[in-house]
Amino acid sequence: MRIALLLISLLMVISLQAQNTKPNASFSISGNEVCVNSCISVSDRSTGEISRWEWFFQGGNPEVSDSRDPGMICYKTPGKYKIFLTVTDNSGNSDLDSAIVSVGFYTPALISVEPMQGQAPLNVQISTTAPAGQCTWYIEGSSYSGMSGLSHIFQQDGNFDICLVTTNPFGCKDSACVDVHVWSQLLQDTSFLVVPNVFTPNNDLQNDIFRTTSSNIVEWDSRIYNRWGQQVFSSNAPDIMWDGMWNGNPCDDGVYVYIIKAIGSDGKIYDISGTLTLFR
């Protein structure tokens, strides 16, 4: 009888030990809310005698991993994505844990300024399509938050940046600046050239045309190319502007490259290249 009780106790201990060594899936991530084109770190926290780890990262890069700690997982597209971890021991016992990651897209910092040049004192009207609560403006050393539009008077001559930083609820940021040229009466014969970095040809009568701002330009050549290197626009005069069309069709949203070569009446040579964003 005593031996039988000892055997039963021994079997119970062995059974409890076997249960304690069964895998229990668990992991931690550096954040459940991230910005597009950002990464998170993933670390295993599982317990038990585990022989195999199987990760699946929906919408992530990499998408799968068999490492215990897969490291950094990156996301390029906004949305809600699941992470799955399956752990297995040598006996075939397995367990599953999961989590959800929300990937947010930044709010484009699109700036409209009218006028972009003029004689001091110059009163300019500034606006954006971004929600007011996501906007912070930086003008002449001062910052202004919570406004999608404002006005500002430049009292002195010179070139001034109007900058906008947008921050969405995920903390994702975007920024852009527009240059404003202000001259005094004595400088009004000086040539200048200002190129915007964004336009929105959506027929709302606001910023529908890619328009440079210039004065006293005597020679001009401008060209615009898409991301495949195809020329979508050219002009031999600064007052000929691009409406976002190519061969009678609207161009896709995206980033385009411009090259401008010009000469001012004061002899100044302009050789400018950069990118502009088309956003309908």
Image (cartoon, rainbow, N blue to C red):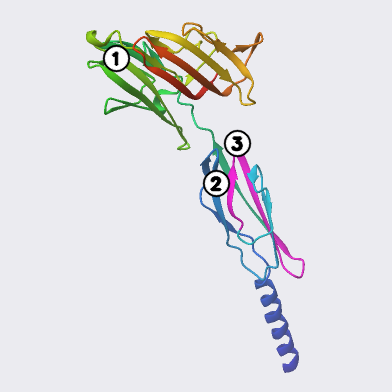
Q: Horizontal and vertical percent for residue 170? A: 48, 37
Q: Residue at x 67, y 81 (%)?
A: 13
**Residue range highlighted in magenta:** 70-95
Q: Say what amino acid the circle numbered 2 marks.
A: Cys
State the residue lying farthest toward the bottom.
Answer: 2
Label 2 SS: strand
Which residue carries the number 3 mark?
A: 79
Q: Is residue 52 above or below residue 85?
A: below
Viewer-nearest of discs 2 and 1:
1
- Residue 182, disc: 1
* Separation of marks 1 and 3 at Cα, in angstroms: 44 Å
| Label 2 vs 3, first from the N-terminus | 2
Viewer-nearest of discs 1 and 3:
1
Which residue carries the number 2 mark?
A: 39
Q: Residues within 10 Å of mark 3 (few under 14, many from 20)?
A: few
* Separation of marks 2 and 3 at Cα, in angstroms: 14 Å
Q: Cβ–Cβ below 8 Å for labels 2 and 3?
A: no
Q: Residue at x 58, y 45 (%)?
A: 74
Q: Residues within 10 Å of mark 1 (few under 14, many from 20)?
A: many
Q: Horizontal and vertical percent for residue 151? A: 31, 15
Q: In the depicted view, which residue is nearer to us: 195 or 56?
A: 195
Residue 279 shown left or right of residue 143 in the figure = right
- Residue 151, disc: none
Q: Say what amino acid the circle numbered 1 marks.
A: Val
